[in-house]
Image (spheres, rainbow, N blue to C red):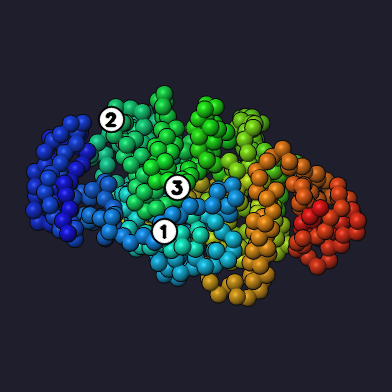
Amino acid sequence: MSAGPFRVWAPAAQAVDLVLGPRRVPMTRGGGGWWSADVSADAQTLYGFSVDGGAPRPDPRAAWQPEGVRSLSRVVDHGAFAWTDVGWQPAALGDGLVYEMHVGTFSPEGTFDGAARRLAHLAALGVTHVLLMPVAEAPGRRGWGYDGVLLYAPHHAYGGPEGLKRFIDAAHARGLAVLIDVVYNHLGPSGNHLAELGPYFTNRYLTPWGAAVNLDGAGSDEVRRFLFDNAVSWLRDYHADGLRLDAVHALHDESAFPFLEELVATVSSLERELGRVLVLVAESDLNDPRLVRPRAQGGYGLDAQWSDDFHHALHAVLTGERTGYYEDFGTLADLAKAFRSAFVYDGRYSVFRRRRHGRKPEGLPGHAFFAYMQTHDQVGNRARGERSAHLMSPGRLRIAAALVLLSPFVPMLFQGEEWGARTPFPYFTDHDDPALAESVREGRCREFAPFGWKPEDIPDPQAESTFAMARLDWTEPEGEPHASLLAWHRDLARLRRETPALRDGDLGRVHVRFDEAARWIVVERPPITVAVNLASEPRTLRLEREGRVRLASDDGVRLSARELTLPPETVTVVES
């Protein structure tokens, strides 16, 4: 097999050579700063580009980095893979249950193939969409993936492009859609050579990671195209069903056709071309409903966004934590508001931020927001990576599951949450630059200071033991208390799947009652009522209508006519 021609964008270069093994082939400059070489080469040959006589660099659009970010690239023929998912269509996101997965720690193997061997577990749980944390090539063999530098290449340690295709093909065979987390707001510093090629970055804006990606300055058309083509590649070449866009509040763009809106238009065009549903989901710190408003109404048209307010309100109520950003939460009134409108801070004053924050998401359906008790951030950005199972009683874990899975939003679980995994998920890296590694350690300590966590409590991100402790223990679901919690999640997922009213996303049908002092809350989404007792004593509540108990987290629940008695720290689901 042969590959070619080769192309690279390097507008400021005086000369560019194509490096093919020991050969150097001068490239020809074309329009718009593109260079090309119309030569053929064996697909197994390592190749790269040398700008103005400099060291050979990997192809920024390479699909395969066999030895990581420090190696040169290999060509991939995307047409050669034997897909078996002809006619595949994913479940609607609004009908779905999303499961966030880190490939490196999900299975003992830490690979795409290892994860594929566990897909039956997800299907039995009731999962419809698997969300992969970033899989683009990043430094080293282990990490979260948010410091990726070669955005087109699936990580070599996970199994590279063929491994990702096998995983997605296997997921589709199980009826599971696959979403991929992509990071367009910054690139990692180690192994990042884009600035040598063109104006990929700008100092006009600053981000927590340094210079911003150039989305609206000179040369930004090609930078944007680089990212749009990347999105298309995941969706077309790998058959992914959607993308999760990391921290879109750090995508600085003052152009009249904002990057996110143009990305939506690009993916919509691809959706029509492919004939299958594709989704875009944003993470944002702004509580800005314009992200998910239709373009015809002046929004960007994304399909959904994560709702950290829902998480913060639920976490603060169930754990009692009030440090850091949790100081803005903690009341049942906050949780009730989160159920009614996703955003608690919708223009309200934030004590933590010391300013008003957010905007009302009026008129938007629940399907436009993700609800969750755990995510990689909310677990991993704790000092020791403690999960909810480390912070809550078994009763409260069941309450959390019921409130997430029966919410009017798109529910999401984080790997292992369904059985109350005791393995932590701390932050881990594998940088080969000692100065960068030390900078990461120091940065983690600064980040945790507002929460009162001590530096000695924070595992060394660079230590392999920190990565190892995050790997799921698949023997846990076989014993108690994990097996019964897993069964509880399966029952809740089944109830959601079998009850159309739980999946309609109609926030106008959500009614919430609570008693702050007595510590109970009732969420009504007729015909389903979810009643929660957070107190350490039994509580008797009067229901709005008669019904029967569908699910109860404790055998001591009693329902007589419309009088419901709940033991301490329990949740009951009543169907009328």
Q: Name the residue under label 1.
A: 85
The residue located at (54%, 52%) in the rendering is 91
Viewer-proximal residue, 448 or 145? 145
Residue 276 is labelled as 3
Relative side of 161 to 294, left or right: left
Viewer-proximal residue, 29 or 272? 272
- Mark 2: which amino acid? Gly
The answer to which quarter of the image holds residue 394 is: bottom right
Relative side of 239 to 496, left or right: left
Q: Earlier in the sequence, mark 2 or mark 1?
A: 1
- Mark 1: which amino acid? Asp
Query: Split into 4 quadrants, where in the image is the N terminus?
Result: bottom left
Q: Mark 2 points at which residue?
A: 219
Viewer-proximal residue, 452 or 9? 9
Determine whether the residue tagged by mark 3 lies in a helix, strand or loop.
Answer: loop
Q: Which of marks 3 and 1 is nearer the N terminus?
A: 1
User: Residue 395, position in %: x, y?
Assistant: 73, 62
Report the label total.
Answer: 3
Label 2 to label 1, Cα distance in Å? 39 Å
- Mark 3 Cα within 10 Å, few/some/many (few <14, many 20+)? some
The residue located at (13%, 55%) in the rendering is 41
- Mark 1 Cα within 10 Å, few/some/many (few <14, many 20+)? some
